[in-house]
């Protein structure tokens, strides 16, 4: 299967696209764009190799009653909320990301601890939401 070399090539090339990007955008381009696409609409170069459709991340708020599901997004990126795709789970990027510690409030008032880079990606995606 050629999926791994393709993802590796895109991951290595992503910093060239992201030289002047905000931290969340740079992280998104290097970790997420291979599947979700540069515009986060689910049309990344390896999306067609997956057995399940890649979600359009610009519609997360629309699919959640108009509210961006920040806690759910954080939990998905850092691996606490597993998603299945291509016959297996979405890669757990939380182990690969840094950025120190970050804390957000959960929808139930609980505290959710994560890594700063995970939160930066979530913030970037929040800014991409369709009107």
Image (tube, rainbow, N blue to C red):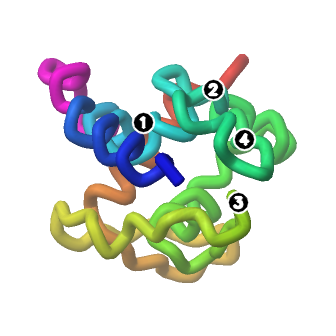
Circle 4: element type = loop
The residue located at (63%, 75%) in the rendering is 81
Q: Is residue 5 left or right of residue 104?
A: left
Which label number is shown at residue 85? 3
Determine which residue is flagged by label 4: 55
Image depth: mark 1 or mark 2 in front: 2
Mark 2 or mark 4, which is nearer the start of the sequence?
Answer: 2
Q: Residues under labels 4 and 1: Cα distance?
A: 16 Å
Circle 2: element type = loop
Q: Quadrant of the C terminus?
A: top right
User: Where does residue 24 sit, x and y in percent of width and height?
Assistant: 32, 39
Return the residue found at the far front.
1
Determine which residue is flagged by label 2: 43
Q: Is residue 85 left or right of residue 25?
A: right
Q: Residues under labels 3 and 2: Cα distance?
A: 15 Å
Relative to 120, does residue 40 appear above or below in the rendering?
A: above
C-beta proximity under 8 Å, tags 4 and 2: no
Image depth: mark 4 or mark 2 in front: 2
Q: Residues under labels 4 and 3: Cα distance?
A: 10 Å
Image depth: mark 1 or mark 3 in front: 3
User: Where does residue 60 sit, x and y in percent of width and height?
Assistant: 71, 41
CA neighbours of label 3 inside 10 A, class few (<14), some (14 to 19), many (20+): some
């Amino acid at each position: 299967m050629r999926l791994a070399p393709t993802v590796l090539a895109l991951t290595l090339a992503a910093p060239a696209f992201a030289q002047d990007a905000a931290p969340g955008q740079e992280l998104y381009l290097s970790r997420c764009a291979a599947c979700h696409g540069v515009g986060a609409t689910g049309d990344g170069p390896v999306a067609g190799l997956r057995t399940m459709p890649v979600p359009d991340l610009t519609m997360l708020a629309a699919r959640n009653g108009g509210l961006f599901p920040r806690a759910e997004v954080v939990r998905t990126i850092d691996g606490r909320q597993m998603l299945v795709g291509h016959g297996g789970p979405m890669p757990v990027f939380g182990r690969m990301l840094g950025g120190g510690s970050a804390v957000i409030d959960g929808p139930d008032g609980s505290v959710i601890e994560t890594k700063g880079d995970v939160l930066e990606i979530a913030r970037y995606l929040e800014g991409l939401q369709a009107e």
